[in-house]
């Protein structure tokens, strides 16, 4: 047997996917012991779960036979990893609050083993401040997350909250069990992402084109590698990696303040497309259209967040900037390396024909003082993973 898993199945429509997960885990020689919550048993039967797991399913905190054969403490510690799938808003809230009124929550409170949660719920429940807070609390305590993904939900709405697919949960389980895959454990990371919005009046703003995808992918890869990751994000419409500490900001000045408040960190990666200028004055009311005069906008320069942090007395050991250019990409990147005092500049060509702006792929060059490394066109997630591997190598060498 490769490892023993304790799978808690919460009450959600996604519970049926957990049956497929059990089957796949068994095929891969994992031992699976199942705990079914009362709500979970409304969606899948104990019989189907136990038939797939090949042993009895645990349901009741106060069942005498279970306590005689195996107490809940023993149950919570006999596994190598506790997996909660689906992790409902209710189970997450109970675990964050330390409640122990039933078998599942008692196990989560009593276990000394790593816990991996696969959240599944309606998009509004997932985005509710209470759930965000609970996810943040659990993550800070070391709970790992996989998903949720985005898509059509059983309730008819669209958005984040769909449980990760069994294949993804399986990959997350393998990763969680494999300490080698967490080379950045103990490292603190900061990522900026997305555009900034610089208000002109209450309804208008200046902004940059940025989807936030590359920055979010890097933050996700950092989290997966075990780094304690803060993501300072301008307004974007994509879903943040669940286990990153998210700070939402609008303006460049807010972004700088958020970054400064998060120092010290070991590595900082600045992917945000920060507006270079902001309207010098912000009108209190919507500026009206007058036939005779088109308003002129006076601009003030925004702080350079990357340059400020790279030159601060709390400078991270590794400072990485991005250079999105439409011409002379490498020359501009080399200039930026010096001007902004960063260690690496990730340069990419964002001229309109490339489809990189807002797209899912990216072709980048890592520009360092000792040379340039060019990668082929890759999915932005893979760029994130490769970058994180380079970061781990570099921080590892410096620590050695
Ligand atoms: O000068 P340019 O905007 O091309 O530099 C890009 C790099 O600098 C990116 O890493 C970007 O996140 C960062 N930057 C910043 N603050 C600014 C402008 C750019 O952090 N005001």
Image (cartoon, helix red, strand yellow):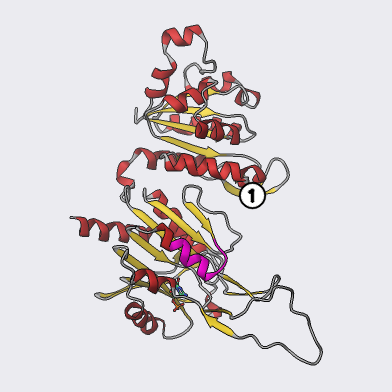
The residue that label 1 is drawn on is 151
For residue 143, above or below residue 104:
below
Label 1: how many Cα within 10 Å (few below 14, some 14–19, many 20+): some
Q: Position of residue 397 (x, y in %)?
A: 21, 58
- Which secondary structure class fits the magenta region best? helix
Q: Residue at x 54, y 35 (%)?
A: 92
Magenta stretch bounds: 249-259
Give the camera-side residue of 225 and 189: 189
Q: Is residue 162 visible?
A: no
Q: Secondary structure at mark 1?
A: strand
The quadrant of the image that shows the C terminus is: bottom left
Q: Is residue 176 left or right of residue 160?
A: left
Which of the 4 image quarters holds residue 377?
bottom left
Q: Residue at image x 34%, y 67%?
A: 319
Left/right of residue 394 with respect to residue 298 in the rendered view: left
Residue that protrudes farthest toward the left in the picture:
400
Locate residue 121, reporting x and y percent.
62, 40
Residue 93 lies, in percent from the top left, at 56, 34
């Amino acid at each position: 047997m490769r490892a023993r898993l304790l799978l808690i199945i919460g009450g959600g429509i996604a519970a049926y996917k957990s049956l497929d997960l059990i089957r796949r885990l068994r095929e891969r020689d994992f031992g699976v012991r199942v705990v079914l919550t009362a709500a979970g048993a409304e969606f899948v039967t104990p019989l189907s779960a136990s038939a797939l797991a090949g042993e009895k399913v645990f349901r009741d905190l106060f069942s005498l036979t279970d306590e005689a054969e195996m107490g809940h403490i023993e149950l919570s510690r006999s596994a190598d990893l506790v997996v909660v799938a689906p992790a409902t808003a209710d189970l997450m809230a109970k675990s964050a609050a330390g409640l122990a009124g039933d078998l599942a929550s008692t196990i989560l409170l009593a276990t000394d083993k790593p816990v991996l949660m696969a959240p599944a719920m309606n998009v509004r429940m997932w985005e509710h401040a209470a759930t965000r807070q609970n996810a943040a609390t659990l993550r800070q305590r070391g709970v790992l997350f996989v998903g949720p993904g985005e898509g059509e939900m059983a309730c008819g709405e669209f958005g984040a909250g769909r449980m990760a697919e069994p294949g993804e949960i399986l990959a997350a389980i393998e990763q969680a069990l494999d300490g080698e895959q967490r080379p950045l454990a103990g490292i603190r990371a900061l990522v900026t992402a997305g555009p900034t919005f610089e208000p002109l009046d209450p309804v208008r703003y200046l902004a940059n084109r940025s989807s936030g995808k590359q920055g979010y992918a890097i933050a996700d890869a950092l989290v997966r590698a075990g780094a304690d990751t803060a993501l300072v994000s301008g307004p974007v419409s994509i879903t943040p990696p669940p286990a990153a500490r998210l700070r939402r900001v609008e303006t460049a000045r807010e972004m700088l303040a958020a970054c400064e408040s998060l120092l010290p960190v070991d590595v900082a990666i600045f992917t945000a497309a920060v507006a270079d200028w902001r309207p010098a004055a912000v009108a209190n009311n919507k500026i009206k259209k007058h036939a005779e005069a088109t308003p002129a906008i006076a601009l003030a320069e925004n702080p350079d967040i990357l340059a400020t942090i790279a030159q601060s007395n709390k400078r991270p050991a590794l400072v990485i900037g991005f250079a999105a250019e439409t011409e002379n990409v490498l020359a501009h990147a080399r200039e930026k390396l010096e001007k902004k005092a960063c260690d690496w500049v990730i340069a990419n060509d964002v001229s309109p024909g490339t489809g990189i702006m807002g797209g899912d792929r990216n072709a980048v060059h890592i520009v360092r003082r000792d040379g340039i490394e060019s990668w082929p066109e890759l999915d932005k997630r893979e760029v994130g993973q490769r970058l994180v591997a380079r970061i781990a190598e570099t921080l590892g060498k410096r620590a050695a």
